[in-house]
Image: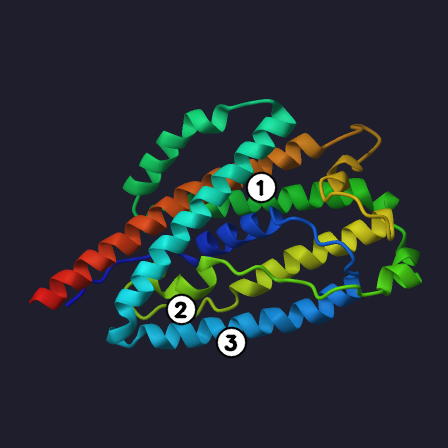
Amino acid sequence: MIQKQKGFSAPVLALSVWTAALAEEMQTGISPRGMIIHGAVQALLLTCISGVFSACWQRAAMQWVWLFSAGAWFLAELFGTVMQAQNICQQEFRSMALIGLLPLLLWAGWCIPPSGWDAPARVLWWFVLLGGLVCLTGLAGQMDWAHLLTADAVQLTRWPRVPLYAEYLFWPLLAGYEEPRSMSWLPWLTFLAQAGLTAGMCLVFGAADYPAQELLRAWSADVFSRMDALLLLIWLTCAIFRTGFLCAAVRTVWQRAVQCGKGAVK
């Protein structure tokens, strides 16, 4: 019988998904209206798929398939997160500090138990909320609601895409061995992040096609002219957290595979 233990909390999984969603490349040719309508439909479908996968996990015959798929997917996302964070460090701060910290992050992720990630996740969520308020404060004066009503702004040239992350499907593996509280709502966090970025780009720049980071560089107020460095540092801190979390997720999957193997031998 598998030993029960406490797993990752909802704030930890939510922060990981939110961090990954903000790092996604901005999709061009998509209006806020199209993002809200079609993105919400896709988020709803992903929520249903997450619920189905959660029910399938209860079948013992599927556990080995789940464990192998989860381990490979978490490793892939770990590599992707490290590369995204390093690119930001190199492009914006001309720094290779993340590479130097990577061994420490991987060691911490492997050693810290799942319950130990809850407290830092809650603290980082406050920084995320603070960064969002700061961003809105600096951009509010530049937003023009008329951009949402222009023909170019409401035209949908292609279908928006809501990314698929490992946390959507494998949260039952991470939420603990006891009956987990449903976390099938995680796709809606990605939808909210993408819809917010799409609406912000449209309100500030209209139908112009700019990189998503231009939205941070457009920040201005009476005291400071730019705040993109602070906002990028907040994201980098969350990316460092996600790197450690993904390593801890790989360790959790590995431990569960070992325990399943011992149970099969017995």
User: Is residue 33 among what the camera can see?
Assistant: yes
SS at mark 2 in the image: loop
- For the point 39% across and 48% down, which residue is it? 75
Which numbered circle lies on residue 81? none
Q: Which residue is drawn at 36% across and 68% down?
A: 180
Task: Please tell me in which quadrant of the rendered image residue 160 appears.
Answer: bottom right
Of all residues, the one furthest to the front in this rendering is 158
Answer few, some or many: residues within 10 Å of disc 2's Cα (few below 14, many 20 plus, some between 14 and 19): few
Is residue 118 in view from this perspective?
Answer: no
Q: Which of 210 and 43 is in front in this view?
A: 210
Q: How far apart are the two marked residues, 1 and 3, measured between alpha carbons? A: 31 Å
Seen in the picture, residue 81 relative to 147 is either above or below; the reply is above
Quadrant containing the C terminus is bottom left
Of the image marks 3 and 2, the number of the one nearer the N terminus? 3
Using the image, determine if residue 20 lies above or below residue 158. Answer: above
Check disc 1 and give the amino acid type. Answer: Phe
Tell me what residue is drawn at x 62 percent, y 25 percent: 93
Are the residues flagged by discs 3 and 2 in contact, CB closer than 8 Å? Answer: no
- Of the residues under marks 1 and 2, which one precedes in the sequence? 1
Q: Residue 207, image x and y in percent?
A: 86, 53
Residue 152, above or below 109:
below
Q: Disc 1 and disc 2: Cα gap in Å? A: 26 Å
For residue 181, the mark is 2
Amino acid type at image mark 3? Cys
Count every numbered label the image shows and give the total: 3
Give how far across and how far down residue 193 sits, in percent: 64, 55
The residue tagged 3 is 48
Residue at 46%, 66% in the rendered image: 183
Q: Quarter of the image holding residue 214?
A: top right
The residue tagged 1 is 127
Give residue 167's position: percent from left, percent from top: 45, 59
Q: Distance between the residues labelled 3 and 2?
A: 15 Å
